[in-house]
Image (spheres, rainbow, N blue to C red):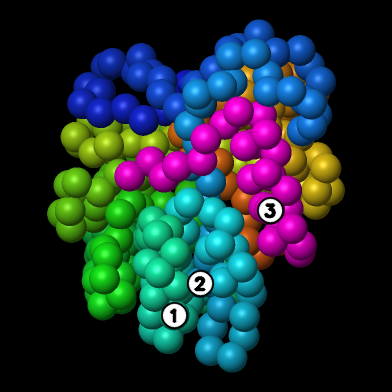
Amino acid sequence: MADVGAVHQREEGPRDRTPLAVGVAGAATAPATEMPSGGRPAPGSEGRVLDLNADLGEGFGIWRLTDDEALLGLVTSANVACGFHAGDPATMRRTCDHAVRLGVRIGAQVGYRDLAGFGRRRIDMDPADLRDDVTYQLGALDAFARAAGDRVRYVKPHGALYNTIVADEDQAQAVVDAVRGYDTALPVLGLPGSVWLRQAAAAGLVTVGEAFADRAYTPAGTLVSRRSPGAVLHDPDAVVARGVRMATEGTVLSEQGTPVRILARSLCVHGDTPGAVEVVRRLRDALRHAGVALSPFC
């Protein structure tokens, strides 16, 4: 069974890639079947803690893509668009205000400057330009978070940038440099085993592994490209069962049906997926029923 490695690590040197597991870093001996969301808590799942996050604030002007208010009542952390792939000043303010009222952690969801493509198209950028774009987005969202009475608590790349820095060392380093230059205390969220998290840890940043309940995985533990059929799961039952299995057993079935070990402290469901509110509500309830406590990681 493949093992995609790290969750929440700090002070990891460039030659030391041993994961420090916390939260839902669970057993790696799960059977190759999806776990039902009902029934009694899975053995060993009691006492586990998981963050539940969603991408929010992804409207623009009069267009609303996500039901931010409903989702903010369900998640523990909100990855808020910073105006480059989606979002605008009014949307950022509104989302931050509501998040603070509900005690939801605000994370900066930074991406490529690509409103037309929703940040899901890779851009071959000069690393210095990417660093500055990320810094700009951090500052913009942080201003609205502070106006609402809180601050940006963590950073999560969006879309094509998220997937690019799984392997691209130059772009990963550019994002690391932006975060480190803005606030070295900000945790960063990403795919376990990615270049992004390794380089962030080597730079002294706190890294947090993330899993996706509604995305298909390759046998190597990376996300299946959105260009491929079945890359995004839309069946609520499948998403709920997948999320519970990730949380309680630390595994997910790849697109080929092989189990892959997933060590993550945060679980994501995309807010722009049709029916996202009901899916997240069901997943939250199923996780609690399985003995998993929901709490932000920062």
Q: Report the mark closest to the observer, 2 or 1.
A: 1
On screen, residue 296 above or below 5: below
Give the residue type at disc 2.
Gly
What's the magenta region? Answer: 274-298
Asked if the residues shown at circle 2 and circle 1 are in contact, with their CB atoms under 8 angstroms apart, the answer is: yes
Relative horizontal placement of residue 71, taking residue 40 as reference (left or right):
left
What is the crowding at mark 1: few (fewer than 14 residues within 10 Å), some, or many (at least 20)? some
**To which quarter of the image does residue 59 belong?**
bottom right
The residue beneath circle 3 is 281
What is the crowding at mark 3: few (fewer than 14 residues within 10 Å), some, or many (at least 20)? some
Q: Is residue 294 magenta?
A: yes
**Which mark is first along the chain, 2 or 3?**
2
Work out which quarter of the rendered image holds the N terminus and state it: top right
**Which mark is first along the chain, 1 or 3?**
1
Q: Mark 1: which secondary structure?
A: helix
Give the residue type at disc 1.
Arg
Q: Position of residue 233 (x, y in %)?
A: 77, 47
Q: Is residue 264 visible?
A: yes
Residue 94 has which mark?
1
Relative horizontal placement of residue 209, taking residue 274 as reference (left or right):
left
On screen, residue 4 above or below 183: above
The residue beneath circle 2 is 57
**Which mark is first along the chain, 1 or 2?**
2
**Residue that lies at the very extreme toward the top in this rendered image:** 29
Give the residue type at disc 3.
Arg
What is the crowding at mark 2: few (fewer than 14 residues within 10 Å), some, or many (at least 20)? many
